[in-house]
Image: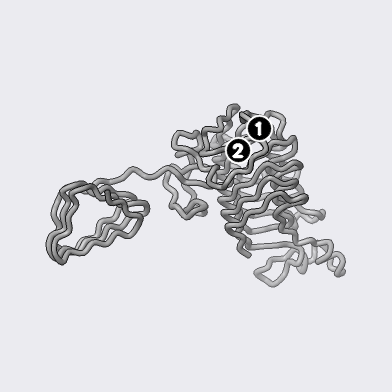
Amino acid sequence: MIVRNNETYDNPSSDFQINADPISTCDDEGISYDDPLCDGSALDSLGAGVSEFNLIEANYFHDGSIGPNLTSVRNSVFRNNIIGFYSRHGTSFWQETDNPKLGSANNLIEHNLFMGESSSHVLQFINHSGNNTVRNNVLLAVSRSDTSVSVRSNTLLLEQDSTTEGKNNVAGNYFVGGYFEGFSPGSSDFSDTNFDASWFVDFPYAGSIAKVEAFKPVANAPIAGVGELLSSTPKDRSGVVRVNPTDLGPWQITLPNSCSMSEETVTTTKTVECEAMDIPGGYEILDGGDVTFRANYYVSFARGFHVGDGGIIHALTGVSIP
């Protein structure tokens, strides 16, 4: 199952839920919770009590009563999502039975923005929902008014219980405000007791609903350019290729340093590859020359660039020509 590029808001219950519901799929069918028919792997056509191999990315879940419920969800990817501002609680990875194998486990939770302004949890892992990888996310506990946004100290930012404490790989995340239960930020995590709405393009005040682009960080935001590049999340929510060090959260706004082409003429077939490149004035493809510029980000041509008769240019990325 792929859940991508959706928006949910203003819902009275959980606005996004994956719930295998082992009560009805197993117990009500006379299947015990520890029977492989209930807790086995979908790879073996088993596991009626779990949901596996889901991709949940680039969604915007916001401004409702309860955040996403991921119940008995295993081996799934939850990345580049924006989730926040629920009156009751935020995102939950949990289950409804006593069988450890039915916990929400072995999931990747990467490059999301989780936000909360109530006293309840922003992100939760309970009831044997362990062995999850939680990296490069931004978790904000804030208090909003009509004219300001500040850190909120009494929001439960990340919660684990006795069955999950020490059982999840939590690293490289940025925590702002709030407090923790069953968890302490590690050496690779970032903790901040301050927050400034100017870190983002147009962070919403109380009572306002932000467009998704409002949550893009600005160039000097403390979450920009501080994360380790993850092979499991190589692009941001809009498809921009991430660089190393990468921006935390769902957006990549930091571009790589460009390599500049020297001023030279080209008469034969040539391919130039670079993360990003600036073509200076004076660079020339002579008559019959055939040049391919290949870059992940951009090719920028300065004034004075010239292609002679019969010359061919290929630019395999975004192109800027003044």
Q: Is residue 92 left or right of residue 188?
A: right
Q: Is residue 96 left or right of residue 56?
A: right
**Callout 2 amino acid:** Pro
Q: Is residue 320 left or right of residue 264?
A: right
As drawn, 154 above or below 105: above
In depth, the one of 240 and 243 nearer the eye is 240
Crowdedness of circle 2 by 10 Å Cα count: few (<14), some, many (20+)?
many
In depth, the one of 281 and 54 nearer the eye is 281
| Label 1: element kind | strand
Q: Is the residue under label 1 in contact with that under label 2 (CB below 8 Å)?
A: yes
Q: Which residue corresponds to the image point at 65% horizontal and 33% vertical from the top-left?
A: 142
As drawn, 157 above or below 277: above
The image quarter in which residue 25 lies = bottom right
For disc 1, the marked residue is 144
In depth, the one of 163 and 175 nearer the eye is 175
Q: x, y percentage for residue 103?
A: 73, 54
| Label 2: element kind | loop
Q: Which residue corresponds to the image point at 71% horizontal and 58% vertical from the top-left?
A: 18
